[in-house]
């Protein structure tokens, strides 16, 4: 029964940006689901539409963006039918987001305590003294040493890792159902990365919270996600359970991405690169946007529609000739 | 003779402001206007000794703030060391002020590729001008067909098509900008190329291309590399030797292969175990670091720098700073309680 009512369902979503130099087709027929308590990784190169998609879910797209088809259903209700007021209520309470650079996401001229208090005031029934208690409790939960002292600190006084912990505290303060983490550890040291990811994972487990982890680091996705969505220039090209995806990638792009990721045993000679670049999304594009870079290209690959094969239960591939 | 050798290299930055602000600072602390106190220095690089042989690639890893970029800038002679020596091709260049080094003949021998290709290219320079600039300034070349030929040659060497010569940085992709940064750094045929996180701003697909290019250039031009990175899996691919830095000090050094297989220092172990891996059998037991790094401002000369986060600290680590000690396999590690445990990374076959 659980699978019939996913926490989040993105269905056939297409989104474009109208720019001076043309219409950028940033997302095309993107579909996927997130279940309760599930951690799903979204991977792909920069420009593949990972962030655009998460902004669309939050309803915070750029004014130039226009959704041309599809719907986003969260908790059984279509987000496009909600009013601006309702969306505002939902953001930060039911869906929270963590951004890439915590230092720019936090207000530099206010203490972290006051920023945390704002969010608690807005999204909970705590009032007066309780708010401070709750804030300190949250700082404790994200393992910030000496929270009483850090409460009065400004973002510049904390390290990048500490700032990201504060962001997590803010994001989970309302016990959301869904957390979108957009490159939450990019730019942090590996040792810090590991502790921040453990924190996100623990927070998700305790609250049975769904998590979307957007990252370009396949290793990170492999280690922390239950399922993985691979994106390439605005298309979802492959969806599978983490283990199955890395064991047997079916889309040529996924296989190339894995082959290009340095690991502990591969030599430089074995490290493959992906030929070509992401296509210009303003141009007229073939059905398969990877076709230009694909080594297995066949004639009918360029013709619509883009296939969506289910090679095994839960393993979807947008390729006519999967590997 | 080694290509480059540093001896006890030290770089301290005063945290006391200079000029008028310094006098205010002093008066607030009840000191004379121009009195200099010894206290209040950030020790970015604290007594670093290492060598790079001709044709060798050495990796420098460590977390942000550990001083690896400062060390790279000292060796590139963009900054002056507080004390210590840098011997390059048999001459001590550590004592020459950076402002004078620019005019010296060794300037062209040590070049650098900077971290972010977008930030480090002049937005007003075309590719041609960016690559021609070092040739005009230091290479003794004049504008003309010869210069054009040389720039085209260099661009071909790094895989940039001639049509990119007239483009500005904003018209180039990340990978193309990285190539421009490399082309201008190798323009003067340096014997030492310092690469400061050359691929960290790039996607894996582009990273792979640039790594292959760097390996190819090294073999063709016979350069030595000092490769600064936080990613051991990338360092592994290009470097025979690796230096692990923590809070201004080298805590472990040795052949890359040996360090990956048998890291002795607890920080190296933590660093290795934190790298996320796709293959489950490459994952090692996570060494969790608790606590926070110590302040690099006037650190105690007796306390081990890693003490505040070390999972196996003992009383001795507080009273006696560990020194680099040799171990079998060519490794040196600065720890009183080096690990005996071997890692099984890379020894198991991967499932495909």
Image (cartoon, coloured by chain):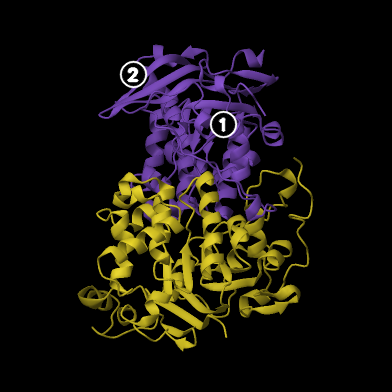
Chain colours: A purple, B yellow
> How far across and down, in percent of the image, does residue A315 sit?
66, 23
User: Could you tell whether A70 is left or right of B139 in the image?
Assistant: right
User: Could you tell whether B290 is left or right of A174 in the image?
Assistant: right
Quadrant of the image for the N terminus of chain B?
bottom right
Is B226 drawn above or below residue B175 in the view shown? Answer: below
Foreground residue, A172 or A146?
A: A172
- The residue located at (42%, 45%) in the rendering is A101
Q: Quadrant of residue B146?
A: bottom left
- The residue located at (52%, 16%) in the rendering is A75
Foreground residue, B329 or A6?
A: B329
Q: Which residue is mark 2?
A: A84
> How far across and down, in percent of the image, does residue B286 sit?
69, 52
**SS class, disc 1:** strand
Is B212 drawn above or below residue B324 in the view shown? Answer: above
Is A1 drawn above or below residue A59 in the view shown? Answer: above
> How far across and down, in percent of the image, does residue A35 sit?
60, 22
Do labels 1 and 2 touch, CB within 8 Å?
no
Q: Disc 1 and disc 2: Cα gap in Å?
A: 31 Å
**SS class, disc 2:** helix
Q: Going by the picture, which residue comes out furthest to the front?
A: B145
- The residue located at (58%, 25%) in the rendering is A298
| Total number of numbered discs in the rendering | 2
- The disc placed on residue A230 is 1
Mark in front: 1 vs 2: 1
The chain carrying label 2 is A
Quadrant of the image for the C terminus of chain B?
top right
Foreground residue, A322 or B122?
A: A322
Q: Going by the picture, which residue comes out furthest to the left?
A: B20
> How far across and down, in percent of the image, does residue B134 sit?
33, 68
């Amino acid at each position: 029964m659980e699978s019939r009512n996913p926490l989040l369902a993105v269905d056939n979503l297409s989104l474009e940006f109208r720019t001076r130099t043309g219409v950028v087709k940033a997302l095309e027929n993107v579909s996927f689901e997130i279940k309760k308590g599930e951690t799903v990784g979204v991977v792909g190169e920069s420009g593949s539409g990972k962030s655009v998609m998460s902004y669309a879910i939050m309803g915070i797209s750029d004014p130039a963006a226009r959704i041309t088809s599809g719907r986003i259903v969260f908790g059984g209700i279509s987000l496009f039918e909600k009013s601006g007021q309702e969306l505002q209520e939902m953001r930060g309470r039911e869906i929270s987001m963590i951004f890439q650079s915590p230092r720019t996401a936090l207000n530099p001229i206010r203490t972290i305590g006051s920023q945390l208090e704002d969010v608690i005031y807005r999204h909970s029934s705590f009032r007066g003294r309780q708010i401070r208690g709750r804030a300190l409790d949250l700082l404790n939960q994200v393992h910030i040493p000496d929270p009483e002292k850090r409460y009065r600190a400004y973002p510049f006084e904390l390290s990048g890792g500490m700032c990201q912990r504060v962001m997590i505290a803010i994001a989970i303060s309302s016990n959301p159902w869904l957390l979108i983490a957009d490159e939450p550890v990019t730019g942090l040291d590996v040792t810090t990365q590991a502790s921040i990811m453990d924190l996100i994972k623990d927070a998700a487990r305790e609250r049975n919270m769904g998590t979307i982890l957007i990252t370009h680091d396949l290793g990170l996705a492999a280690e922390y996600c239950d399922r993985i969505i691979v994106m390439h220039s605005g298309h979802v090209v492959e969806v599978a359970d983490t283990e199955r995806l890395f064991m047997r990638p079916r889309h040529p792009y996924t296989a190339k991405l894995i082959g290009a990721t340095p690991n502990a045993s591969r030599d430089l000679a074995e490290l493959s690169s992906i030929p070509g670049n992401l296509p210009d999304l303003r141009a007229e594009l073939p059905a398969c946007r990877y076709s230009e870079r694909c080594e297995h290209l066949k004639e009918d690959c360029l013709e619509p529609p883009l296939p969506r094969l289910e090679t095994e239960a839960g393993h979807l591939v947008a390729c006519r000739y999967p590997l | 003779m080694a290509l480059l050798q540093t001896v006890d290299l030290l770089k301290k930055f005063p945290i006391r402001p200079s000029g008028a602000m310094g006098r205010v600072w002093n008066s607030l602390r009840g000191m004379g206007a121009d009195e200099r106190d010894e206290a209040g220095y950030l020790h970015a690089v604290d007594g670093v000794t290492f060598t790079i042989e001709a044709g060798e690639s050495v990796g420098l890893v460590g977390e942000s703030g550990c001083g690896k970029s400062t060390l790279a800038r000292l060796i590139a002679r963009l900054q002056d060391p507080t004390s210590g020596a840098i011997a390059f091709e048999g001459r001590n260049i550590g004592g020459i002020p950076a402002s004078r080094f620019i005019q010296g003949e060794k300037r062209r021998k040590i070049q650098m590729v900077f971290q972010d290709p977008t930030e480090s290219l002049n937005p007003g320079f075309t590719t041609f001008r960016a690559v021609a600039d070092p040739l005009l300034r230091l290479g003794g070349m004049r504008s003309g067909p010869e210069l054009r030929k040389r720039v085209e040659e260099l661009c071909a060497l790094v895989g940039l098509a001639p049509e990119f010569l007239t483009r500005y940085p904003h018209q180039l992709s990340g990978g193309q900008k990285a190539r421009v940064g490399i082309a201008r750094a190798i323009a003067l045929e340096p014997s030492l190329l310092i690469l400061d996180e050359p691929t960290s701003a790039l996607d894996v697909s582009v990273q792979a291309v640039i790594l292959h290019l760097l390996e190819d250039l090294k073999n063709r031009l016979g350069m030595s590399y000092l490769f600064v990175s936080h990613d051991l899996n990338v360092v592994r691919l290009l470097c025979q030797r690796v230096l692990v830095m923590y809070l201004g000090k080298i805590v472990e050094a040795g052949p890359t292969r040996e360090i990956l297989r048998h890291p002795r220092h607890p920080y190296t172990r933590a660093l290795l175990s934190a790298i996320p891996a796709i293959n489950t059998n490459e994952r090692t037991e996570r060494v969790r670091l608790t606590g926070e790094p110590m302040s690099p401002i006037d650190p105690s000369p007796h306390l081990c720098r890693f003490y505040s986060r070390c999972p196996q600290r003992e009383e001795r680590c507080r009273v006696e700073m560990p020194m680099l000690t040799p171990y079998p396999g060519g490794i040196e590690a600065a720890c009183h309680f080096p690990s005996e445990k071997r890692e099984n990374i890379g020894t198991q076959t991967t499932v495909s």
